[in-house]
Image (tube, helix red, strand yellow):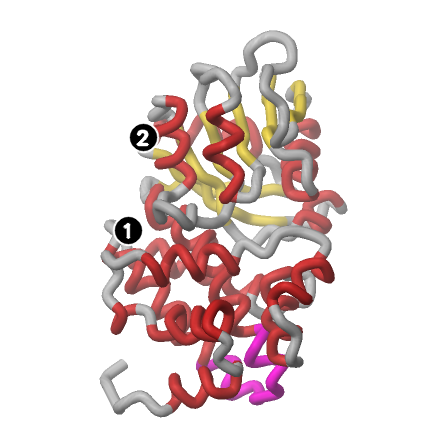
Amino acid sequence: MKITIIGHGAWGRAVGQVAGRLQHEVAFLAHSDTTWPGPRPDYVLLALPVQHIRETLTHLPPPGVPVLSLCKGLEITTGDRVSQIVTETWNETRVGALSGPTFAAEIVAGLPATCTIAAQTDELTREFQAILHQPSFRTYRSSDLIGVELGGALKNIYAIAAGTCHGLKLGQNSMAGLITRCLAEMTRIGVQAGARAETFAGLSGLGDLMLTATSDQSRNFRFGTLLAQGFSPEEILPKLGGVCEGLPTTRAVYLNQAIPADSKPIVTQLHAVLYEGVPPIDAVKNLLGRAARGE
């Protein structure tokens, strides 16, 4: 198979290596490219920062082949998921998403990893699965495209929150409680958007959340840790060595009026820290000081 990956960052290169192990012919395009390399590919994989996707696709002619998103985020201006952006921009409905607990460096090292692939039809999901599945990169199928995309996007928000908890040295009790409530919040947001609750108990939900909300390999976690230490977002970003998807995704979810405010208290407080100058410790007090309620 001929596979073109749009995006040549660490994650795109890692998945390209996975495809190469199965003897697929892999080519890369950069964000600024405007033409396809050589013959039309059989599949296109997207590995770009989400805020660049619409512009990039607008400058490329639609390839007319299935597209698999490797991206984890939401577009700020619209709140759209990546599959929606692809369909709107390229008029392509054969779109899927891959998500799960997968750090690029470990994939490149050949360490075992598991993830979920979703698309709107089982046939298309099986196609995507077939081009990547192998013992060191085990893939599972899902029919919940909305849930898989939202799980991958929302966990970045909560990884920042967890990093902030870590940076404030609030203890292991606080961290366990926070991650549990983050999972409840992301599930609630997902269900309101049409996803299935059980999806968030899987690899693209709980699995990815546990990885990115507990590891220094996660740029979002490191961002939160530095935020708690008093650095501003503008000071932190150059230190990360890559994109922090949780930052724009927090903005997108906060601005989405279809999500009621009482469904996203953690997002709301994190947004206040990131965009309104509220000190992290004050946001913690605001969350802890809310009225008692049922779980």
The label on residue 195 is 1
The spot of residue 16 in percent (x, y) is 66, 32
Q: Magenta includes 270?
A: no
Q: In which quarter of the image is the C terminus?
A: bottom left
Q: Are marks 1 and 2 in contact (CB under 8 Å)?
A: no
| Secondary structure mostly seen in the magenta stretch | helix
Residue 17 left/right relative to 115: right
- The answer to whether residue 269 of the structure is visible from this angle is yes
The spot of residue 105 in percent (x, y) is 72, 50
**What's under tag 1, amino acid-wise?**
Ala
> What residue range appears in magenta?
163-177
The spot of residue 79 in percent (x, y) is 36, 48
Observer-nearest of 238 and 87: 238
The residue at 68%/66% (across/down) is: 235
The label on residue 246 is none
Q: Real-space Cα distance between discs 1 and 2? A: 15 Å
Pointer 2 residue: 121
On screen, residue 40 above or below 68: above
Residue 70 left/right relative to 136: left
The kind of secondary structure element at disc 1 is: loop
- Crowd band around label 2 with a 10 angstrom C-alpha radius: few (<14), some (14–19), many (20+): some
The residue at 34%/59% (across/down) is: 255
The kind of secondary structure element at disc 2 is: loop
